[in-house]
Image (tube, rainbow, N blue to C red):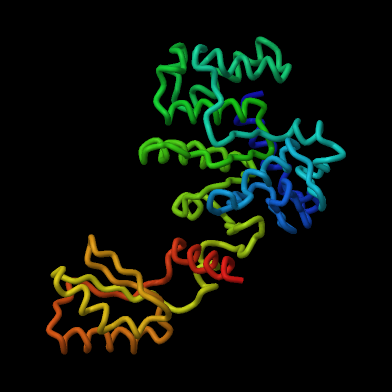
Amino acid sequence: MSMDQQTAGRQQSTKSASAPAAIDAKSICKKFGDIEALEDVTLSIARGKVYSLLGPNGAGKTTFIKILTTLLKPDAGTAAVGGFDVVRQPERVREIIGLAGQYAAVDENLTGRENLEMVGRLYHIGRKRSRELTTEILERLELTEAADRRSKTYSGGMRRRLDLGASFITSPEILFLDEPTTGLDPYGRSELWGVIRELVKGGTTLLLTTQDLEEAEELADVIAIIDRGRIIAEGTGSELKDKIGGSVLEYRLRSVQDLEPAVAATGGLYDGEPSVEPAILRVSGKVEHSSDALIEVVRRLDQRQIDIADIRLRRPSLNEVFLTLTHKDRNR
């Protein structure tokens, strides 16, 4: 049976309404000494979905992944992956998951083909089947031409794709990717996103951790913002943007000499301090009464004979949502 047939069969099986959530975590807590890495984390991920944990370094993302993949035990709470308890049934969990960490875990002295075949053998798939799967994966990842080169000659993007390939050589039902595009250039990141989308089309459930706001919005069905070990918001990208309400009013000037007087003239119209970007002469910030604020900004700048290159109202970006919510959380 090919990988496509296996994933198609899995996709069909996930349509059953009685199937448990792919991942179901309740009140997970974990401490390291005096540091509370996770505090009462609860979430549920439906089968066949992409769920992203978005947060800064030290937020608890990797700790949570390690608990769900049976590498750490929680201090409190319960978690089930594919219906199996991560503490009481770790062997069953490991049979159905794949994991790719923050950095490519490949043997640089082996070829790409040898790396994948070795993983297959470690999973006791058998020599013949390991070779068949390796060929399929190399084709899927567009690594066939480089398959017999030592992986030390691979680019960063190629290594990450190879590492990802190793994580799904067993056709996992559920895949965990911990900051998969760390260190990649834009081209390498785009390549890896393409591979991830193909996996999801095949029915794989994906839990993705990232610090990259664009990545979360590009790939995830649901995004959870985690900070200091707690989930502080959850929803689609659109729902998260609605959480902080209002609109963002931004304008860009033509002259650097106008920047300081423009900020002084319009700063009080924003809800809080506006963001000032001197390099591109842009001022932006959240406003509650968007139409009135837009008219007033134009009026005040016109009174001072300050030229506006561009002005617009828009919805908050995910970056602005993230900064707003985590700022509130840190000031509790």
- In percent of width and height, residue 311 lies at 25, 75
Relative to 314, 278 lies left or right: left
Give the residue at x 22% y 79%: 262
Residue 1 in the image: above or below residue 44: above
Count of residue discs: 0
Give the residue at x 72% y 57%: 39
Give the residue at x 60% y 52%: 59
The quarter of the image holding the C terminus is bottom right
Residue 245 in the image: above or below residue 73: below
Seen from the viewer's position, the closer of residues 88 and 116 is 88
Give the residue at x 60% y 31%: 4
Quarter of the image where one finds residue 255: bottom left
Seen from the viewer's position, the closer of residues 7 and 206 is 206
Relative to 153, 98 lies left or right: right
The quarter of the image holding the N terminus is top right
Residue 117 in the image: above or below residue 293: above
Seen from the viewer's position, the closer of residues 68 and 30 is 30
- In percent of width and height, residue 268 lies at 34, 85
- Residue extending farthest to the front is 34
- In percent of width and height, residue 142 lies at 44, 26
- Residue extending farthest to the right is 88
- In percent of width and height, residue 234 lies at 61, 63
